[in-house]
Image (spheres, helix red, strand yellow):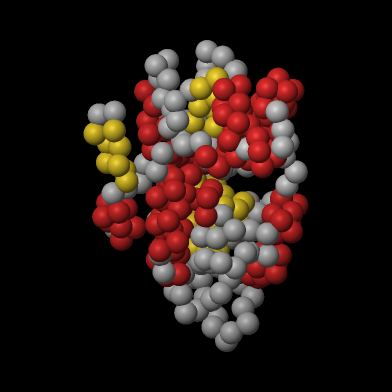
C-alpha cells in the first residue's frame, strides 16, 4: 500500500493495545512517520499536520462502524479531548462502575475468541444453546447432533419477561401472549468462511421445520418446535469463524441475525462468562468458562 494517512491509521490499529493510555494523536503519528521516513521517503514534519487530521477522521469513522457492526473497537478518544487517542478499554476516572466493568471484561475478548476456536463442533452447539439462555430464553433446546444439519438449537422468548422485568404488567393477558421463536444454526469453522450457500441452507431448513416438512421418514424431528401460523421467528446464525462479504450481504437482506467468532467473543465478554473479578482487576478463567458450558 502506498504510504499515506490510511496506511498510518492501519499501523495504529494494529499496534495499539486495548488498555493503552491516552496519547496525543499527533505525537503517535509523528513517531510512526519518523520510524518509516527512509522507507517511505518522506519528511515527517512536512506531512504531520495534513496527515493527522485525515488519520483522526479515518479512526473516528472506523470506530463508529466497528461499534455499529457489533465488534470490539481497538481505539477510543479520551473524553477530555478528541486529540487524545487511547485503547478502547482504557478506564477513565470519570467512568461509572458499569462502564468500568464492561471495559475490564472486554479486555479478554481475544481469550474468548481463542476459547471458541478450541471447542469441538458439538461443544460449540452447546455454547450456542447457552447463548439463548443469556438472551432470557427459558429451557432452550439443543437438537441431537445426528438428526439434522439445519436447525441446531431453538427456544421461545417470552417478551413479557423482558417488558415486566422491573415493573408489574399493565395488560397481563396481552403481554403474556407476546413471544417469539429463536431458531439457530451453529457452524464450527476454523479456516473456511461462511458463504451464501450456508445461509440459504439454514433459512430453508428453518422454513421447512416451521412447516414440519422433513426429508427423512421421521414424523417429527423437533417435537417441541410447535410454531403457530402467526408466531414471529428470528433466525440466529452463529459461527466460530468468519463470514464472507457475500454472506453478510445475504444476511442483512434476509433478516438473519448472525454472529461470527469476533462478535460472539465480544458478546460473551460483555456477559462476563468465565471472568473472575478481583477489585480493579479481572481474569479470564478457562475452568470457570468450561463449567458454565457444561452446566
Q: Is residue 15 left or right of residue 293?
A: right
- Residue at x-position 40% and y-position 64%: 119
State whether residue 292 appears in this view.
no
Q: Residue furthest bottom?
A: 217
Q: Residue furthest left?
A: 278
Q: Is residue 235 left or right of residue 275?
A: right
Taking 293 as reference, is 17 above or below it? above
Measuring from the top left, give residue 269's x and y in whole percent: 42, 43
State whether residue 58 appears in this view.
yes
Q: Nearer the viewer, residue 234 or 47?
A: 47
Q: Is residue 69 left or right of residue 110?
A: right
**Quadrant position of residue 192:** bottom right
Measuring from the top left, give residue 289's x and y in whole percent: 32, 53
Measuring from the top left, give residue 242's x and y in whole percent: 59, 58
Q: Residue furthest top?
A: 80
Tell me the quarter of the image containing the C terminus. bottom left
Q: Nearer the viewer, residue 91 or 31?
A: 31
**Quadrant position of residue 126:** bottom left
Taking 81 as reference, is 254 above or below it? below
- Residue at x-position 51% and y-position 71%: 222
Q: Nearer the viewer, residue 206 or 33?
A: 33
**Quadrant position of residue 61:** top right
Measuring from the top left, give residue 106's x and y in whole percent: 43, 39
Amino acid at each position: 500500500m502506498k504510504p499515506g494517512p490510511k496506511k498510518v491509521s492501519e499501523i495504529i490499529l494494529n499496534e495499539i493495545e486495548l488498555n493503552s493510555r491516552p496519547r496525543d494523536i499527533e505525537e503517535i503519528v509523528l513517531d510512526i512517520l519518523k520510524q518509516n521516513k527512509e522507507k517511505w521517503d518522506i519528511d515527517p514534519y512536512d506531512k504531520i499536520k495534513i496527515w493527522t487530521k485525515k488519520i483522526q477522521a479515518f479512526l473516528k469513522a472506523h470506530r463508529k462502524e466497528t461499534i455499529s457492526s457489533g465488534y470490539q473497537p481497538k481505539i477510543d478518544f479520551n473524553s477530555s479531548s478528541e486529540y487524545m487517542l487511547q485503547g478502547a478499554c482504557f478506564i477513565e476516572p470519570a467512568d461509572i462502575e458499569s462502564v468500568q466493568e464492561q471495559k475490564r471484561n472486554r479486555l479478554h475478548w481475544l481469550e474468548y475468541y481463542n476459547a471458541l476456536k478450541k471447542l469441538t463442533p458439538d461443544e460449540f452447539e452447546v455454547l450456542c444453546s447457552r447463548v439463548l439462555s443469556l438472551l432470557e430464553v427459558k429451557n432452550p433446546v439443543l437438537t441431537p447432533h445426528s438428526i439434522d444439519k439445519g436447525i441446531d438449537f431453538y427456544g421461545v422468548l417470552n417478551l413479557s419477561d423482558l417488558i415486566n422485568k422491573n415493573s408489574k404488567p399493565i395488560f397481563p393477558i396481552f403481554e403474556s401472549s407476546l413471544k417469539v421463536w429463536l431458531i439457530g444454526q451453529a457452524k464450527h469453522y476454523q479456516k473456511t468462511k461462511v458463504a451464501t450457500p450456508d445461509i440459504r441452507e439454514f433459512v430453508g431448513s428453518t422454513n421447512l421445520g416451521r412447516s414440519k416438512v422433513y426429508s427423512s421418514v421421521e414424523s417429527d424431528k423437533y417435537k417441541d418446535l410447535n410454531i403457530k401460523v402467526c408466531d414471529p421467528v428470528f433466525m440466529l446464525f452463529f459461527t466460530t469463524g468468519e463470514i464472507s462479504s457475500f454472506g453478510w450481504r445475504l444476511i442483512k437482506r434476509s433478516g438473519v441475525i448472525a454472529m461470527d467468532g469476533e462478535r460472539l467473543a465480544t458478546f460473551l465478554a460483555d456477559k462476563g462468562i468465565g471472568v473472575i473479578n478481583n477489585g480493579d482487576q479481572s481474569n479470564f478463567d478457562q475452568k470457570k468458562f468450561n463449567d458454565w458450558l457444561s452446566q
